[in-house]
Amino acid sequence: AKLLVLHGPNLNLLGVREPDVYGRETLADINTRLAHLAQKAGHELAWYQSNAEHELIGRIHQARDEQIAFILINPGAFTHTSVALRDALAAVDIPFIELHMSNVHAREPFRHHSYLSDLAVGVIAGFGSDSYFLALQAAVSKLEPKPA
Ligand code: DQA
């Protein structure tokens, strides 16, 4: 199946930005590793990063035309602000996992609320770049046919 990983604002700076919070791995490192693991599991993985809300929304709309089966999304700060991103995910009706590298619940109160979590299949937060790999593992497991 086809999977899409979406990275929201400022995640292009991974590896450089607040390494104490977000680690030293770059976005390119993470994407390469994800694509490799997805391929090993028999899937195809595309990725996209944008700092612009409308571009992320456009990419979500496009995912429906591409028959993307599952979305992994780190919405960055849009997690806490964007009704529009929520509406886009609801509109395309593609199952998604929300993920965060940091444990948002251990941070400032404004990071405790997400506009996406109640629509998500599940939420993963606090495992650094491993959050992406745990999310991929969960998505792959959801896509596997379960024995009757
Ligand atoms: C983040 C957490 C958000 O609160 C923050 O705005 C980010 C990154 C994370 O991966 O921990 O940009 O989504």
Image (cartoon, rainbow, N blue to C red):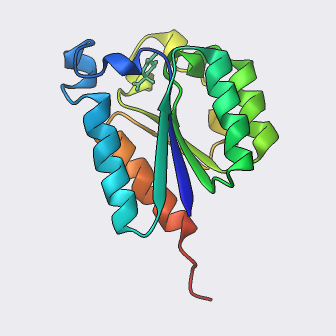
Quadrant for ligand 1 reads: top left
- Is the C terminus in the top left, top right, bottom left or bottom right quadrant? bottom right
Q: Is residue 93 visible?
A: yes
Report x, y in % for residue 137: 40, 58
In the image, 71 versus 63, the foreground residue is: 63
- Quadrant of residue 58 in the image? top right
Q: Residue furthest right?
A: 91
Report x, y in % for residue 114: 60, 25
Residue drawn at point x = 34 percent, y = 67 percent: 40
- Is the N terminus in the top left, top right, bottom left or bottom right quadrant? bottom right
In the rendered view, tell whether residue 11 sits above or below residue 130. Answer: above
In the rendered view, tell whether residue 48 sits above or below residue 113. Answer: below
Report the side of 49 relative to 19 (left or right).
Answer: right
In the image, 131 versus 52, the foreground residue is: 52
Residue drawn at point x = 50 percent, y = 33 percent: 48
Report the side of 55 relative to 136 (left or right).
Answer: right
Q: Is residue 129 visible?
A: no
- Quadrant of residue 108 in the image? top left
